[in-house]
Image: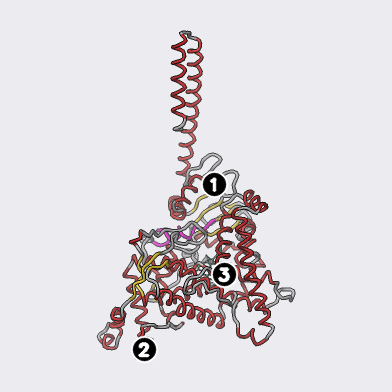
Amino acid sequence: MNHNFPSYNLTATAVFSSSSYSGSDEPLISGRLFFLKYVQILEIFIALFAFVTIHSLRQKKHQGVPVWPFLGMLPSLIFAVRSNLYEWLSEVLIRQGGTFRFKGPSFSSLNSVITCDPRNVEHLLKTRFSIYPKGSYFRETVRDLLGDGIFNADHETWQRQRKTASVEFHSAKFRQLTSQCLHELVHNRLLRVLKTSVTIDLQDILLRLTFDNVCMVAFGVDPGCLGSNLPEIPFAKAFEDATEATFFRFVMPTFARKLMRSLNLGSEKKLKESIKGVDDFADEVIRTRKKELSLETEIAKRSDLLTIFMGLRDDNGEKFSDKFLRDICVNFILAGRDTSSVALSWFFWLIEKNPEVEERIMVEICKILEQRDHFGDAEEKIEYEPVFRPEEIKKMDYLQAALSETLRLYPSVPIDHKEVLENDVFPDGTKLNKGEKVVYAIYAMGRMETIWGKDCLRFRPERWLRDGRYMTKSAYKFTAFNGGPRLCLGKDFAYYQMKYVAAAIIYRYRVRVDVKSGHKVEPKMALTMYMKHGLKVNMVKRSVSEIDRYYAPFQKGAYNNGV
Ligand code: HEM
């Protein structure tokens, strides 16, 4: 527009000035007519533009978001993605009473129903679970990386994997494996890295820790990302690149993706190369494990997922193919890789902003440790380096409440989706058409007064406690771990892992965000809620006298005094 106005002035000046020089009226009249026509067209254009704008903006009242011809709600979405998509979605959903229909451009496949109403969430995750699969669009988009693994499977393929993995995840052997791996990672790696650094990107450290941990659980191998010099591990890098390039597919028109794929260009080229990196690693592990397992005695020693699935048979009594074994492990790594570490990052950020919560966690830990029979004489006490026992971690109710409160406000998976298999109606009356997409906005659910009350925006772990004991909430109000038959399989493991790591760090350090460097904490727009710029913190070591102060109220004399 700015560009047009100067040229319009120039044209008008030129018309009048040329006629006054010629002395004839004819060019003047034709010039005036031309000018009037030009102005008329401009006026019509402006009127039309004003009409469309007013009409589109007025749609906001009924539809929650302005709806533009051809583009639908896309302009608002683009604007939201550039600022904060999750906050924007929450605002629209609150305005619309919990559900609205997103209208994408006519040429896209973005149309969907978005909801944060717990009644609808229960309907799609449990009541009518069978008609809300992940769907063909999702499957096709992520198939190259995830194959037919649990995360990308529906119906029977999903059910079979779920059943086997579920037995495994709840077995005593698996629990032993996870606690051994965590002990090794926290005490021999994490705490050593923290000891030698003052200012660190805590999110990066935690991502490395959970990547190593989930690889140990799924593949039974340790990639070593949390080595002392924080090395770049080719498998971890390939995995990260592959997930990023897969995510990019969701925001790219399908025809563009297919073209780039056939020409082996851009993100599709990156995806192909990185998947090769993942496959090479998986093939090597599977080959080596097969060799090891030819010795019967080795099988009994291992309880990782790969070994378990290698020992099983499919419905036809055949062994699982190497490709299927690869898919199973890659899916578990994806599911358990970053979710706990980003949750822990938000947790450390929140407890710094809420020092009374940090205080209560420290008090809880010291109270539990003080109950050890031998504690007073143990070397652990002298060194102030306790190794938490599984039964102690279990007793940390307040810490679990603080972690749940973190996930309520900053869920690691902020939005999730399903596809509608047949026409249906949500409990709130919204009609759903076959083939439509449904998005459930987990981040927005944590910000609904109708679910959590007037103080829904406050970080208040106490809302999870009754008589000091942790109480779980309905999975359809607190959907951070999904709900219904597809409830997160790693939920118990994740809580154990997060509590273990959080307790080990809080007992030794105060974690303080590095404000001096102007570090900004904000979410990244991705499938997992990473902190966009990481979490740069200073690790302030607690002194022995400070730790002693926390123990003081629980020592014998103090108990007798009724503390
Ligand atoms: C704070 C940590 C975690 C959170 C918030 C979380 C959240 C979720 C969510 C929202 C889903 C549903 C995803 C979907 O179907 O679209 C899910 C599924 C799953 N999670 Fe987790 N998760 C966490 C940790 C873990 C860990 C550590 C593991 C394993 C080591 C794990 C294993 C799985 C698996 C296997 C599924 C697929 C279940 C199925 O489809 O039947 N998760 N998780």
**Element type at marker 2?**
helix
Count neighbours of disc 1 (C-alpha within 10 A) and say few if under 14, some if 14 to 19, many if 20 or more. many
SS at circle 3: helix
Mark in the foreground, 1 or 3: 3
Q: Position of residue 149 (x, y in %)?
A: 63, 67
**Residue 479 position in % (x across, y down):** 49, 64
Q: Which mark is residue 333?
A: 3
The three-letter code of the residue at mark 3 reads: Ile
Q: Where residue 406 appears, x then y in whole percent?
A: 42, 66
Task: Give the answer, above or below, for where 298 lies relative to 428.
Answer: below
Question: Dot 1 corresponds to which residue?
Answer: 103
User: How far apart in space, not on screen, are marks 2 and 1 (Cα)?
Assistant: 62 Å
Q: Is residue 436 above or below residue 333?
A: above
Q: Earlier in the sequence, mark 2 or mark 3?
A: 3
Give the number of marks.
3
Q: Are marks 2 and 1 in contact (CB under 8 Å)?
A: no
Amino acid tagged 1: Lys
Q: Residue at x 65, y 73 (%)?
A: 284
Q: Is 178 on the left or on the right of 148, as rendered?
A: left
Whether tag 2 and tag 3 are in contact, CB under 8 A, the answer is: no
From mark 1 to mark 3, how far is it between C-alphas? 34 Å
Magenta-colored stretch includes residue 378: no
Q: Is residue 467 visible?
A: no
- Please state which of residues 342 and 417 is positioned toward the viewer in this rendering: 342
Q: Which of these two is toward me, 58 or 428?
A: 58
Q: Which quarter shows the C terminus?
A: bottom left
* Residue topped by disc 2: 375
How far, Cα to Cα, is label 2 from label 3? Answer: 38 Å
> Amino acid under label 2?
Phe
What is the span of residues highlighted in magenta in the rendered image? 439-452
- Who comes first in sequence, dot 2 or dot 1? 1
